[in-house]
Image (cartoon, helix red, strand yellow):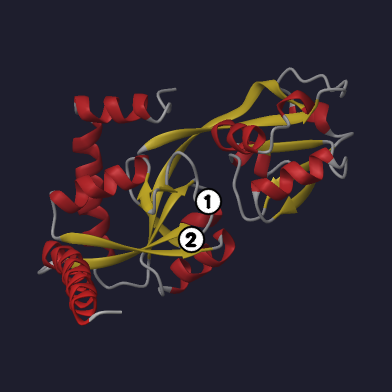
Amino acid sequence: MTFIKILFLLYLFSFSVLAHTSLQSDDSQAKKGKVILTVAIEEIGYFPFNYEENEEIKGLTIDILDYVEANSKYAFDFIARPWPRALHLVEQGQIDLILTLFKTSKREQSYHFIEPSYANEVNQLFTLKDSNLEFTGQLQQLTAYSIGTTREYSYGELFDRASYLTKLPALTEEVLLKLLLSRRIDIAIANPLIFNRIISKENVSAQIKAIKPQIAITPVYMALTKAREDSKEIKQTIGELIQQLKASAYYQELLEKYQLNY
């Protein structure tokens, strides 16, 4: 390699390092003077509320947090954890905020739910195409079947309290699909936006059918740890900004963008 080539490569390397440092600096400058809140998100994402695309975190909840950040003293750092672990860490105060949570009386003992809710989520039953399952909306019709759920998820209080149902928890929706395809469960319950995406990715649409009516349309919330001394102030500020956002045309645009305008 010639001396000129070496100098040229060193120049390119130096330029690359400076560019990378600049990006980090800009992000740091944007958060300078802000109160940083840590946010637990699932490692695999939770489409369309939060997901990774081109190495960037996107989704309805992320857009809402961007709005909060632009209009308050708070900024957000994301920490990816499995869902059960994320719930535990927020409850213990090791992470400040968790996203896309259903409100239940049990969970209200552990977290501050930020009012109002910021969206609704649908949960629906899925089974194999050759299943003769008949469902008209009464949970009692499901007593003869094994139902795959995702561990530590809520599906609305009515379903959660139905102790007469056979529920088999799995770690992720991907695992639920595998269990269904292998006939280790009779039914899977999931958010159709998420589950249909996985079905399409695995190219098994011909084997799976969605069951109507839907199990529930349930409000989703952000929830805050109770361990912070300033948690009530944070809850009030974010709640007021969500209320303000929900009254805007921009919010309706977001719901349409993410197909959440139920």
Q: In the drawing, what numbered circle is on residue 54?
A: none
In-image side of 214 versus 5 (left or right) = right
Residue type, numbered disc 1:
Ser
From the top left corner, tell me how far across and down residue 92 is, in percent.
46, 74
Considering depth in this image, is 180 or 225 the residue closer to the camera? 180
Residue type at tag 2:
Gln
| Residue 10 occupies quadrant | bottom left
In percent of the image, x 19 and y 60: which residue is there? 74
User: Is 171 above or below relative to 193?
Assistant: below
Numbered label attached to residue 105? 1
Give the label on residue 109, or none: 2
Circles 1 and 2: CB atoms closer than 8 Å: yes
Crowding near pointer 2: few (<14 within 10 Å), some, many (20+)? few
Residue 82, picture quadrant: bottom right
User: Does residue 132 sit above or below 164 in this rendering?
Assistant: above
- From where the camera sits, is residue 165 visible? no
* Crowd around label 1: few <14 · some 14–19 · many ≥20 (10 Å): few
Image location of residue 63, percent across then percent down: 29, 43
